[in-house]
Image (cartoon, coloured by chain):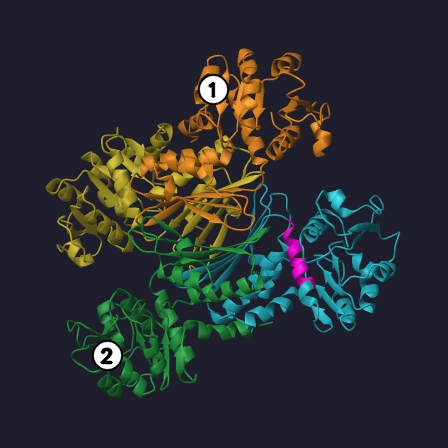
Chain colours: A green, B cyan, C yellow, D orange
């Protein structure tokens, strides 16, 4: 769902990976109807990746005619209204990565979670979600260490990074204390500085391109597969790896 | 056990912390016999912290006359010969942070582990041990990510950092591939670079002073308390925090 | 000259900047002959930016029909054979950023430098060239400080970064001592670590995209303008800024 | 002048370096009168390094009896009142590194500068001063690049780093925009982030110990030697290295 800049990046990752298959794409505009995403983006791929528009085909019709294991959503606040009920009714996994909604959508996802696996995570990259869990763990180990959140983005990004805010909140810190650096074309970095009396631990995430969301979404879809119905966050899929440490 | 540069740093941390009490110190030389570590180091403390020498008093005698919960060892390869059996026989926890032995001491510790809690960890800081566990977790989450180990130390450090070698081995990497930077007076940094196709995660540890070992040793002694007998590594004490992620 | 991946990135920067005008492009293939780079790349621009092919039009003919102040070259080893003599004969500035040649081209550039301003610099970004000059300066200030070169690139880059090698050579270091990190999709970072006994200075350059070469090439072309004929390196254009420090 | 924590560190560096000789030290307290700094600090040194107290001996008397090339001052706001006139009258170089005064002392130094070489620099490390000059140079080269100042210090440091404020001011930035990280026992880092559209340049300084001030003060004293009388800043001694770039 969605074929904006991030949607395209995610689609290109899906088409390039051998272990997933991109069946179809739904976008708002009808301009590319029935074309193939591979040809529009310019990648080699055998995936069908047919582009539809929301006005042309209902989610129910698409899911019935071209069944999928999971719906991946990088659209906008209204995307879930299009596909939510249809996906839930068919037990199709939902991976929603829309970062901001204009209302509280969690009850809605919890509701869908009674019929399927409904995941919503505003930042769906593996690196950021790992970092948040690792930081929570270190905070439990060393509750007295001071923690600071520093994020860097391109000059024209007006607001504090939403990901940084969630990190701060997740660690019990005041989001107003986040240090924001705005300079040139920095894609995005997030650093957590753990200050101990005699040592420093830094957890740092650097974004290279938005394709990172693609691998995160695929990780989510693959890990939801076989899980019981319910409402999920990326953290819920990653936490078992923390519990089951390799020797 | 031990009152060299690291031993003194550890002793000073123990004397400054209110939740532990430094009963006595054993060192090889008799030069400071019966003086108080607080006065020798120059810190304010009510801890007894009496200095003994190994030739003057046996570990058994000291442990009987001045009982302790744990023995903390920053001495040398021969320290364990002095106190090992005596501590094990009395069920006193053992925290050994000697980084290199001239023989394989693990069987010895396993043996003591039948009577007490015997921990041996060559780098006992909280930060390094957390980092190793977090890195193992990320490697399980993302087995395809490339990992590089970079360590920086003062110019005159001749060999590759032992901590870096253990990190590489723990992650299934070739220790010969560690990148070593040697420049000026850098105390010590260890960085793990996780390279994903579209993002980078860095775990970085910076040492400020050797007092970091003190807080690590205290963490170990406190977490051994109440645990069943056995052989322990720092990782074993930290792993439960990974399993029991806070919400 | 050149319309490969870097050539396109450079062209797009030139078309987007108001203070330069991209007159035409020459590439080897005739596939895009007479199309406009703006339309091929998909940027808004009033620059002519007409694409020609080397087989279709000689450099002399192009330079006579569509005069320019400078020729910017991101093509290949053979590009200079196409335009070198023609540009020199007409006193057109030459900015060549081809990183590797199969022969020693410096004498050739020196020769052209008798008739025009002929610049050749294998890495033409502002950041890298600044960093090299700043590092040389610090080395003169503190000849005893230890210096290490660390470079990071994507996993599949096989050889040591040419930029890092030139940095090492420029600083009198052994290029074999460069530390290379290869992981995931890292675009490229270069770090110089200056280790003093009691402090560390790091100069670090991080590439975001290859468009950085565009701004570097424009800087070169603009700074060559009005300079005497001769052979130039980026360093020669930047050094005056070091001499003329603002208060 | 001065034998507090920084004064001692500076004295120890002076005694360990073969190319300078520490003649004497003046401090406020008389507690260590006539003892040798080498023995008080515990370093091996043949330097006289005799400790005097300001109440016991006037600067004029000391300078006459034990002549020196330069006076190095890490004392307090009142130190210059003790030695300033006496040093100036004898043409002895003055290196004052007191970071804050309760009044504007620059006119005073300019006055002394008519009789001797009078230097005052609040942060006298080589690294910080190099960084400031390098940053000014890069700003002249790339006036459109965005610059951010980030500084990190120990948790209990209440105010913004004075060094960071001077960096911001020197670069024409608003000191209120400095990003301050306060965590654990971080000694001190200063980073200047230059954000370009497609690349990032970072200049980073990390303090290891306060001994760094010692090497900076010696650099200053040695570079003042032979210079004309006048008022100097560290920048004035370093700028010539920028002008005279090695090939």
Magenta stretch: dominant secondary structure: helix
Tell me where residue D169 sits by quadrant.
Answer: top left
Q: Which chain letter matches label 1? A: D
Q: Which residues are magenta?
A: B210-221
Pointer 1: what residue? D109
In this view, C121 is above or below A150: above
Left or right, D189 with respect to C12, comes to: right
Q: Is residue A123 left or right of residue B177?
A: left
**Disc number at residue A82?**
2
Q: Nearer the viewer, residue C229 or A165?
A: A165
- Which numbered disc, 1 or 2, marks the residue closer to the eye? 1
Q: Is residue A111 magenta?
A: no
Q: Look at the picture and state if D207 lies above or below B13.
A: above
Residue A8: tell me if it is visible. Answer: yes
Residue A59 screen position, x and y as percent: 24, 82
Q: Residue at x 82, y 67 (%)?
A: B90
Q: Residues within 10 Å of mark 1 (few under 14, many from 20)?
A: many
* Numbered disc 2: secondary structure: helix
Q: Secondary structure at mark 1?
A: helix
Q: Nearer the viewer, residue B95 or C141?
A: B95
Q: Which mark is residue A218?
A: none
Task: Tell me how far mark 1 sits from mark 2, CA to CA.
Answer: 75 Å
Tell whether C117 sits left or right of B76.
Answer: left
**Residue C114 in the image, given as x and y percentages of width and height:** 27, 30
Tell me which residue sits at (34%, 83%) in the image. Answer: A112
């Amino acid at each position: 769902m969605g074929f904006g800049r991030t949607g395209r990046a995610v689609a290109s990752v899906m088409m390039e990976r051998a272990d997933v298959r991109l069946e179809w794409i739904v976008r708002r505009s009808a301009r590319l109807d029935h074309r193939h995403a591979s040809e529009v983006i310019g990648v080699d791929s055998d995936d069908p990746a047919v582009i539809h528009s929301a006005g042309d085909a209902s989610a129910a019709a698409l899911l019935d005619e071209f069944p999928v294991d999971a719906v991946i959503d990088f659209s906008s606040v209204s995307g879930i209204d299009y596909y939510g009920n249809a996906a839930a009714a068919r037990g199709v996994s939902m991976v929603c990565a829309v970062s901001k909604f204009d209302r509280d959508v969690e009850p809605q996802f919890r509701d869908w979670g009674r019929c399927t696996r409904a995941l919503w995570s505003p930042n769906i990259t593996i690196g950021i979600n790992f970092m948040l869990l690792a930081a929570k763990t270190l905070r439990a180990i060393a509750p007295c260490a001071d923690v600071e959140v520093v994020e860097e983005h391109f000059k024209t990004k007006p607001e504090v990074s939403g990901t940084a805010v969630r990190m701060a909140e997740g660690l019990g810190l005041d989001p107003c204390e986040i240090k924001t650096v705005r300079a040139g074309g920095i894609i995005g970095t997030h650093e957590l500085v753990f200050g101990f009396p005699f040592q420093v631990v830094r957890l740092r995430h650097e974004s290279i391109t938005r394709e990172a969301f693609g691998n995160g979404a695929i990780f989510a879809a693959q890990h939801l597969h076989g899980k019981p119905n319910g409402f999920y966050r990326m953290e819920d899929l990653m936490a078992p790896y923390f519990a089951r440490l390799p020797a």
